[in-house]
Image (spheres, grey):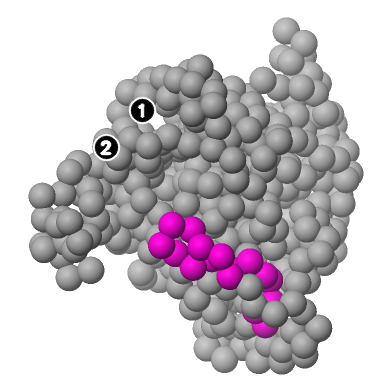
Amino acid sequence: MKILLASLLGVTQLSAAVAGPAKPNIVFILADDLGYMDIGANHPGTFYETPNIDALAAKAMRFTQGHAACPVCSPTRASIMTGKYPPRTGVTNFIGFNRPGKCLPAPNQDHLALEEVTLAEALREAGYTNFFAGKWHLGDGGFSPNAQGFGPGLVGKNQFYYPPDASPPDPRNDPKTTDRIADAAVRFIEANKDRPFFAYLPFQAVHIPIGAKPELIEKYQRKKTTAPDDAWGTERASKVRLVQNRADYAAMVEQMDAAIGRVLAALERNQLDDRTIVVFTSDNGGLATAEGHPTSNLPLRAGKGWLYQGGIRVPWIIRAPGLTRAGSVCDTPVTSTDFYPTMLALAGLPPRPEQHVDGVSLVPLLGGKPLQRGPLFWHFPHYGNQGGAPGGAVRDGDWKLIEWYEDGSLELFNLSADPAEKHNLAAANPAKTNELKTKLAAWRKQVNAVMPTPNPGHNAKGVNSDSPM
C-alpha cells in the first residue's frame, strides 16, 4: 500500500509541474553499443567526453544497476517497445544473424510482430504525436516503424528510418547520421511544442563501423598521447580491450553527446523542460571483445554479446520533472522491460499489464521510494560476433547465475562483493546455485523460451561442416 501511495503521489507531483498540456512530453534517447563506463557520470576517469549526458544526469536520476534485456541490440529494442522479455517476442538475437556453433541456435524472428501493442502505439492512442529517426532494427517493409506507432511517411531501408524532411546524409562529417537525427528532432520539437509528443531517438552511434567528424578524431589523437597504452586480456578465446584510448571511438561518442545537447537545448529554448520526461540508455554494453575492440568496460567483465555485466549493464538516466530529485542515484537493479509501464505511469495513463507483462513501473524509485523489483532474467540462445556462447542468466539481488547452454556449466557471482565477476562461487555455494538455477528454469518455461539444440554438423575441432563460418 505504501508503494502504491508513493506511486500515485509521484505521478500527481509530475502532473502538477506540467504547464499547458495535461500530459508530459517524452524524449527517449537510445545509444547503440554505448558501455556503462563510457560516460563521465558513471566513470569520471573515462577517456571520452560526455558533458551533455553528464549534465542530464546531474538533473535526473542515474541508475547504477540499469540493464539491457539482452547483450545485443534487437532483443533489447523489442523489450523497450513491448515491455516483454525477448523470448516472448521471438526476437532473441539481432535481426538478420543466426550462426551455428557447437549448438544449433534457437530460431530468431526477423521482425517484431504487428500484434504487439508498442509503447509508441499506446502513447499515440492517448493523443501523443510521435517522432522517430535512426536505427529501428525490428523489421523492414511492413514491419518498419511506420507500422508500429511512428510515422507515417518515414523513409529508409535496412533497419534505418528518418522523417522525409531529414537532412541528407553527410558521409564525411556525419557518417553515423548523428547530426541528421538531432536536427530532425529539434525541428520536430519546435513544431510540436504545444502538444504532447513522444520523440524516440535511437542513434546509430556508437556502433561500428566507427565514424565521426575528422576534426574530432584529430582532437582525440592529440589527447591519446597522454592516455595509457593499449592493454589486452582474454575472455575464453576472445581478445578483450582493457584500456579506453581509441581516438576515433571517442570522437564518435563526443559527436553523439553534442547532438544530445542540441536536443536538450531545444527543450529548454522552447520552455519545455518542466514538462518533458527525458530517458537516456543503451541497447547493450560496450563492444570490447571483437570487431575492433573499440572500448573497455573495466571493471565490468567482457562486453557486448556476453552475459557478464559488461554486456548487459548499461547507462541509464531518467529525468521526470517534479518527481526525480536532481543528481539522485538509484542502486536498485532494473531492466529495459520496465520502460514501457514507467512511461505510461509518468504520462498519467493506465497500465497495460497484458502487454508489458514483464515490466514494472519504476515510479516509486523515481520518487525516492523503495521498490522490490524482483529477479531479472536473460536468455541468449545464440552465438554472436563477439565470442560469447549461448546461455541464460538470472540476477536476484546481489546474486547472479549464468548457465551456459553448450555444456550446462554454471557460474555464480555475488555482484556486491565481486562486481568484476572474477570469482565463481557455484561450487562453494551449491544451495544458492540450485536456487537460482531453479528460478531460471521456471522462468524459461513461463516465457516459452526456445533452447538451442546439438549441432550434428559440428566436429571435434569446432568446425561446422554445414557452414562456411
Q: Position of residue 208 (x, y in %)?
A: 50, 74
Q: Position of residue 242 (x, y in %)?
A: 63, 66
Is 245 magenta? The answer is yes
Mark 2, Cα crowd under 10 Å, few <14 / some 14-19 / many 20+, is: many
446 relative to 332, above or below: above
Question: Which residue range is magenta in the image?
Answer: 232-247
Task: Give the residue type at disc 1.
Answer: Arg
Q: Position of residue 162 (x, y in %)?
A: 49, 69
| Residue pointed to by mark 1 | 444
- Picture quadrant of residue 380: top left
Q: Is 360 left or right of 363, judged from the image as shown?
A: left
| Residue pointed to by mark 2 | 451
Is 411 magenta? The answer is no
Contact, mark 2 vs mark 1 (Cβ under 8 Å): yes
Residue sitting at the far top = 1
Identify the image quadrant of the N terminus.
top right
Q: Position of residue 400 (x, y in %)?
A: 55, 33
Residue at 79% across / 19% down in the picture?
Answer: 6
259 relative to 248, above or below: above
What is the secondary structure assignment of the residue under circle 2? loop
What is the secondary structure assignment of the residue under circle 1? helix
Residue at 17% across / 70% down in the picture?
Answer: 468
Comes first in the chain, label 2 or label 1: 1
Q: Is residue 19 or residue 403 the one in the foreground? A: 403
Q: Is residue 368 or residue 390 the one in the foreground? A: 390
Identify the image quadrant of the C terminus.
bottom left
Task: Give the residue type at disc 2.
Answer: Met
Per the rendering, the mark at residue 140 is none
Q: Is residue 141 visible?
A: yes
Q: Is 203 left or right of 74, judged from the image as shown?
A: right
